[in-house]
Amino acid sequence: MTVAEPYEDVGSAEEIGVRLHAADNVVVAYRDLDEGTAAAGLTLRQAVPRGHKVATAAIPVGEPVRKYNQIIGFATVAIEPGDHVHTHNVEFKAFERDYAVGADVTPTELVPDEERATFQGIVRADGRVATRNYLGILTSVNCSATTAKLIADQFRRPGLLDDFPNVDGVVALTHGTGCGMAADGEGLAVLQRTLTGYAEHPNFAGFLMLGLGCEVNQISGVADEWTIHPATPVRTMTIQEQGGTAATVRAGTKALLEMLPAANEVSRTTVPASELVLGLNCGGSDAYSGITANPALGAAVDLLVRHGGTAVLGETPEIYGAEHLLTRRAVSPEVADRLVERIRWWERYTAANNGSMDNNPSPGNKAGGLTTILEKSLGAVAKGGTTNLTAVYGYAEKVTDRGFTFMDTPGYDPVSVTGIVAGGATVMCFTTGRGSVLGCKPTPSLKLATNTEMYERMAEDMDLNCGVIVDGSASVQEVGRELFQLILDTASGRRTRSEELGFGQEEFVPWQLGAVM
């Protein structure tokens, strides 16, 4: 998808908005427009907020509203040219999509090895490449969460880490489950898979796994699944075995202090960009997400794939209605089938919980101009660029395929990002239009603003302003190239805004499935 020129009459100095495809019957307003505004052969029949849609043609009742030359909803009343098009006159309805498996698959033109981009990474003893160097405290159950945080707090005392400049910190990753659940089944499997993904994450130089002792999610059951190099220091303990909270804080602090010297014995070295695993997520989306930040991230993904790297798109509910754009890029029927199977699972899952896939757009999304999940999804898939879809993974499964991949995650940002990081993402790119502040230790998270107004208002949280695309001062491809370099710089140790602010510990939220007992 490319951004078209502004929709305007020849010689008109007043722009109404941007038309994303010649076949569209709406345009997206550049700015707040008053009722009666006349331009481009239209007279607005109502006021239209910035980012919202204006009809450029009559749309009869029941007929589709088209944006990106795709269906984003259906008119519930007769819509006239110049009308504000939004939730008051558009509804979500399911419709048939042509999956055309593999129709858009093309050979990937890889950059020759000697010309590939590089970054300064940390190479672990087993060959894995890290972008950060943390010690972690993982918890088997919510009952050990407070104790884990008390241990991590010891390492925030002034001067304690001064002698270990190569260690980025000690982070406690706690969660709200681990007990009150079935002793087998999908819920426990997802939690243990998530914890295993973090235990094996290259950005951890070592870790402590902390439990209470009597929980369903026994540490031994999790540890049995680990594949960890012997050089990686690992300790496990439970509060009950240690003799209580205070004793566990002392023992846990001592164990991590003993890990610090070895964790500090690392240095950064030049490694190819093919070693990067880039996570892709969006949150607090607005109508500009699919016009600026998401396509720019897609352009950066295309560059990363050409340089041999890996990207992971998630948020299955937020590709709903646009999944046919991905199946067309699937390298095999098996890959496409797995994606469609996950879509069908989500349809059953939401129906069983008396919901709808169209429940996904949040109030903030709608205030920003997104009307249905179909519209939101069409913008969201742009994060994945244009290259072939090489694999589809379950939540928190280890990502092993190179190229552009997909992971089945919920649309809720912290849960989605947690799964993608568990899969091995070593840098995260997070696009936002309303202004998200998420971090995801031990992986650095770059915030990409979709519009200049929000970027300037929340500049201390944002890493890149993609609003320059709609402002007209840069193209999607130019911002994509700038972002690709920023990703390499971040992988090399450049701190992100969320890291400077200390985000990333509380945002660890494994997907909780199954009954709470």
Image (cartoon, rainbow, N blue to C red):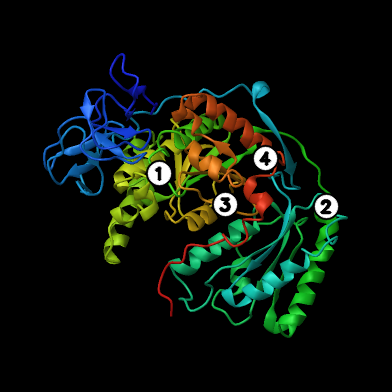
CB within 8 Å, label 1 to label 4: no
Instruction: Quickly name the residue at label 1.
Output: 286
Q: Residue at x 45, y 68 (%)?
A: 187
- Closest to the camera, between mark 1 and mark 2, is 1
Which label number is shown at residue 421?
3
Q: Quadrant of the C terminus?
A: bottom left
Quarter of the image for the N terminus: give it: top left
> How far separated are the C-alphas under marks 1 and 4?
28 Å
Q: Which of marks 2 and 3 precedes in the sequence?
A: 2
Q: Quadrant of residue 22?
A: top left
Q: Position of residue 448 (x, y in %)?
A: 53, 40
Q: Does residue 40 appear left or right of residue 246 in this picture?
A: left
Query: Answer yes or no: do the residues labelled 3 and 2 have beta carbons within 8 Å?
Result: no
Which is more foreground, mark 1 or mark 3? 1
Q: Is 145 located above or below residue 41 in the figure?
A: below
Marks 1 and 3, Cα distance to the nearest angstrom?
24 Å
**Label located before the other in sequence (1 or 4):** 1
Residue type at mark 1? Answer: Asp
Residue 491, label in figure: 4
Q: With respect to residue 3, does 185 lie above or below?
A: below
Q: Is residue 85 above or below residue 109?
A: below
Task: Please state the horizontal and vertical placement of residue 247, each as a whole percent of the image.
Answer: 77, 81
